[in-house]
Image (spheres, helix red, strand yellow):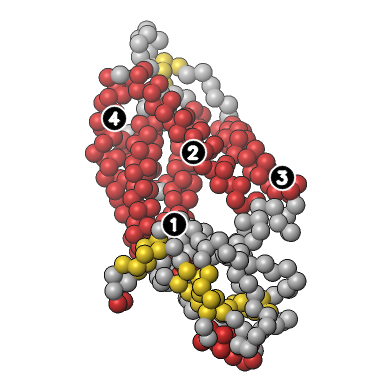
């Protein structure tokens, strides 16, 4: 939803020192009070340089008004609305508008550079105040933790029973699904989204951009090996597992201490970083999105956290891997979040 169906705006040459003088402010206010030319998305938004007052423009958003009075909102008919600003020959510009542009933000920043990078104003007047819903964000994070813990308590025994009855089948299917989910998230989401953060700009050459992206990708591949090297240095190399009773051929071997440390450190450290990033996403959602979208992101976090925490629980309590008691596994899993 847009807060309004249109927004009047005027862009003019700014002061060399980026200051807001009385003369500049007066020129902007006079322009906004005049008749403004309507501009549909896709058109160029000119920088006003001649005329008294300077010409202003009315940006027409692709939306349909719903409701009335203070509850009126404009329901978006398109995902984005774009107007290009040609700043060739200008070192700085001053923008006067009917609304703060952040009111029309959702998934993208309101001002982008040629390479897709975000552009922030040097100064704003009056200063933009974005409501910080700390209480809602903290409450959402707490709800995610509680829902996940309760879900694991009730669902984990069911999956554990299923695993004990069909261990080979469950292990193969679960491992295949986990590997596929990780690869899909990496190649279809994370690697592509990362390209938005390395746009080629005046300050970043193509070589620098590719170096950042390539180095970060390779670091993701080698991180598990680095973690394994650190653990091996601390607890020693993994030793062959020994059975509790050599005469019991069907009895599962007891996992060595080094193997348990490897499993516990991998699961709990990964869970900690995973939940830390989830917290960033929830906080960003309540800081930058509307309430409905923020709670939608919270719900999505609960769903995927539930599946992941159940998997962690099964690994931590498996006698061949973590070999922890159920209450200990639940406690460590909760603390890592």
272 or 232, nearer to the observer: 272
Q: Which one is closest to the eye, mark 4 or mark 1?
A: 1
| Distance between mark 2 and mark 1 Cα atoms | 27 Å
Mark 2 crowdedness (10 Å alpha carbons): few <14, some 14-19, many ≥20: few
| Point 41% across, 18% down: residue | 253
Q: Are marks 2 and 4 in contact (CB under 8 Å)?
A: no
**Secondary structure state at the residue bearing disc 4:** helix
Closer to the chain start, of discs 2 and 1, is 1
* Residue visible at 34% across and 44% down in the picture: 303
The label on residue 211 is 3
Q: Are marks 1 and 3 in contact (CB under 8 Å)?
A: no
Residues marked 2 and 1 touching at CB (< 8 Å): no
Give the secondary structure at mark 1.
loop
Say few, some or many: other residues with alpha carbon within 10 Å of mark 3 (under 14 / 14 to 19 / 20 or more).
few
> Mark 4 to mark 1: distance in Å?
44 Å
* As drawn, 261 above or below 130: above
Is label 2 in a helix, a strand or a loop?
helix
Q: Which residue is mark 1?
A: 78
| Residue designated by label 4 | 159
| Residue drawn 60% across the image and 62% down it | 112
The local secondary structure at tag 3 comes to: helix
Crowdedness near tag 4: few (<14), some (14–19) or many (≥20) residues, C-alpha within 10 Å: some
Distance between the Cα atoms at labels 3 and 4? 44 Å
- Whether residue 128 is visible here, answered yes or no, is no
Q: Which residue is mark 2?
A: 185
Labels 3 and 2: the sequence-earlier one: 2
Tag count in the figure?
4
Earlier in the chain: of badge 1 and badge 3, it is: 1
Q: Earlier in the sequence, mark 3 or mark 4?
A: 4
């Amino acid at each position: 939803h847009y807060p309004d169906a249109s927004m009047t705006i005027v862009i003019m040459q700014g002061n060399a020192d980026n200051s807001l003088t009385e003369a500049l402010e007066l020129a902007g206010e006079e322009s906004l009070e005049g008749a403004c030319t309507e501009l549909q998305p896709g058109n160029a938004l000119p920088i006003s340089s001649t005329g008294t007052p300077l010409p202003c423009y009315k940006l027409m958003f692709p939306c349909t008004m719903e409701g009335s009075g203070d509850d009126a909102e404009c329901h978006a008919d398109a995902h984005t609305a774009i107007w290009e600003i040609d700043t060739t020959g200008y070192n700085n510009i001053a923008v006067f508008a009917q609304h703060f542009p952040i009111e029309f933000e959702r998934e993208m920043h309101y001002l982008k550079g040629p390479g897709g990078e975000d552009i922030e104003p040097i100064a704003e007047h009056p200063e933009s105040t974005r409501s910080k819903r700390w209480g809602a964000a903290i409450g959402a994070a707490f709800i995610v933790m509680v829902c996940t813990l309760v879900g694991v308590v009730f669902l984990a025994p069911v999956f554990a029973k299923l695993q004990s009855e069909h261990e080979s089948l469950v292990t193969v299917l679960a491992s295949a699904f986990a590997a596929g989910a990780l690869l899909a998230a990496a190649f279809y989401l994370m690697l592509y989204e990362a390209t938005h953060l390395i746009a080629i700009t005046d300050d970043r050459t193509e070589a620098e951009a590719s170096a950042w992206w390539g180095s970060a990708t390779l670091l993701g591949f080698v991180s598990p090996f680095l973690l394994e090297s650190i653990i091996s240095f601390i607890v020693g190399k993994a030793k062959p597992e020994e059975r509790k009773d050599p005469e019991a051929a069907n009895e599962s071997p007891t996992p060595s201490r080094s193997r348990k440390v490897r499993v516990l450190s991998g699961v709990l450290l990964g869970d900690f970083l995973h939940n830390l990033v989830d917290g960033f996403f929830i906080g960003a959602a309540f800081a930058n999105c509307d309430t409905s979208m923020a709670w939608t992101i919270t719900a999505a976090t609960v769903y995927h956290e539930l599946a992941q925490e159940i998997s962690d629980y099964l690994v931590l309590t498996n006698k061949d891997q973590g070999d922890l008691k159920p209450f200990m596994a639940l406690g460590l899993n909760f603390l890592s979040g």
